[in-house]
Image: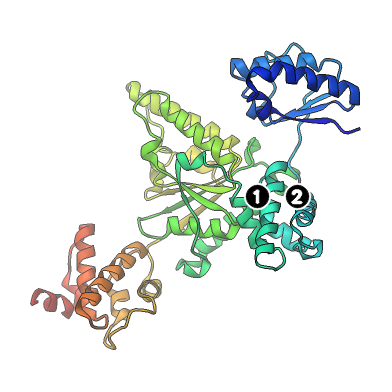
Amino acid sequence: RRPLVVDIAALAAAGDRVAELIRTLAAEARLTHGGAVLGPLEALAPERPEGARLLASLCTAMSGTPLIAYGKKNWDPLWTRDSPVPVTVLPPGPAGAARQWRRALADAARSVGLPDAQAPADDRLIEATASYRLDTDQLRKAATVASRLAVLEQRPVHPDDLRTAVRAQNGAGLERLARRIEPAVGWDDLVLPPATRTQLTELALRARHREQVLGEWGMRPGGGRGRGVIALFAGESGTGKTMSAEVVARELGMELYVVDLSTVVDKYIGETEKNLERIFVEASDVNGILLFDEADAIFGKRSQVKDAHDKHANVESAYLLQRMESFDGIAVLTTNLRANLDEAFTRRLDVIAEFPIPDAEQRLALWDRCLGTSIPRDPALDLEFCAARFELAGGSIRACAVTAAYLAAESRAPLAMDQVVTAVLQEYRKLGRLVLESEFGPWLAKERGR
């Protein structure tokens, strides 16, 4: 016998007909001897009085009939007279998730006219979806979107279709709290030391296999309750921290959400914690990476309590420590000053990647890459000189390249060395750095003589 599946959100929106619908549902459940399935509880908001009353009415009407309620929230005994038998359902491992995707894609293929044989093979299916967390409804919708994308182009379902379809399931809740970035850069766009690349690869690896390692195998570091992966990117401004987070997000087929700390930190006591809680809750439900830029502003060291402000700041830090342990998503913290972070935070980090100022060889690669292949270059353009003399981070090199390109466009001539030097001088002034003849050599005298 099949149970009745109750759309709890539609029931809650029925208005004056709610009582009549509850009686009808209860009667049909008894007649069919199949019971009922109710959920998700979050859609009913039982913590609110009206939601609790509706849930109590439904459970009372279903008394004596098998009733399965599901959701992410723990059951509150105050909601109803009788307490249910709690059952914890763990997310499936990679193989189980692949079977779910296989069934969902088969159903979607039949509905859109796509042959079953055109779905990805199991190994590619696992690789494409291992880092995602979807409920049954989201998975069904994602499979349908992926199948429709394949039908539109008259080809088999590709792993990229699955990634696009999963991103389409992300709600807009987190976008109200963070800036969404759809990754557009890859590993080949990064110019980083091998050690930093290794740490980025490890972050992607941990994110991809966290369900298996932390869930199935129970390898939670320090006994933490969450299944999240948290990384720290430490380095000076412009060394590629945000870009690296974007690359990892693209590797995992996820979107990047950058948290604007100006919308989080609040002068009123308790409001900062509320804002952070909303972000953590929304991020746990989204298949994306959460990026806290300049995280030392909220993850800073706890201080000795001297006044009410210090006490409140320490309460914020204590809250964050607890919340990180129970976080189920993927978060990246970036900082220019690693020493400012509380040691208790760093102990809870899964990956720490250092982003040093690039050396001369890396700077040469950055200059060449930032200038691109479309700008005509003067044969006398000496990028080796720029890389050897000007110790700039990647962000500053990119800014210099853009400024030099504008100067070249104005001159209606190929990009020349004097335009690059002018751009570097402007960047030095912007950074508040001293202009030394030992760095600029003969080009400084030429610039001053112009």
Label tally: 2
Which type of secondary structure does the marked residue at label 1 adopt?
loop
| Residue 97 image label | 2
Q: Amino acid at mark 2?
A: Ala
Q: Position of residue 185 (x, y in %)?
A: 49, 64
Q: Is residue 130 visible?
A: no
| CA separation in Å, label 1 and label 2 | 9 Å
Residue at image point 77% right, 25% down:
86
* Percent position of residue 227, x then y: 64, 41
Quarter assignment of residue 62: top right
At a point 11% along the width and 77% down the height, the residue shown is 445
The residue singled out by tag 1 in the image is 132
- Tell me if label 1 and label 2 are in contact, CB under 8 Å: yes
Query: Which amino acid type is shown beneath numbered disc 1?
Result: Tyr
In the picture, the quarter occupied by the C terminus is bottom left
| Secondary structure found at label 2 | helix
Give the left or right position of residue 141, taking residue 355 as reference.
right
The quarter in which the N terminus is drawn is: top right
Across and down, in percent, residue 348 comes to: 55, 41
Of callouts 1 and 2, which one flags the residue occurring earlier in the amino acid sequence? 2
Q: Residue furthest top?
A: 81
**What residue occupies the far bottom of the structure in this picture?**
379
Give the side of residue 334 with respect to residue 406, left or right: right
Judged left or right of residue 373, residue 409 is left
Viewer-proximal residue among 284 and 27: 27
Q: Position of residue 248 (x, y in %)?
A: 54, 58
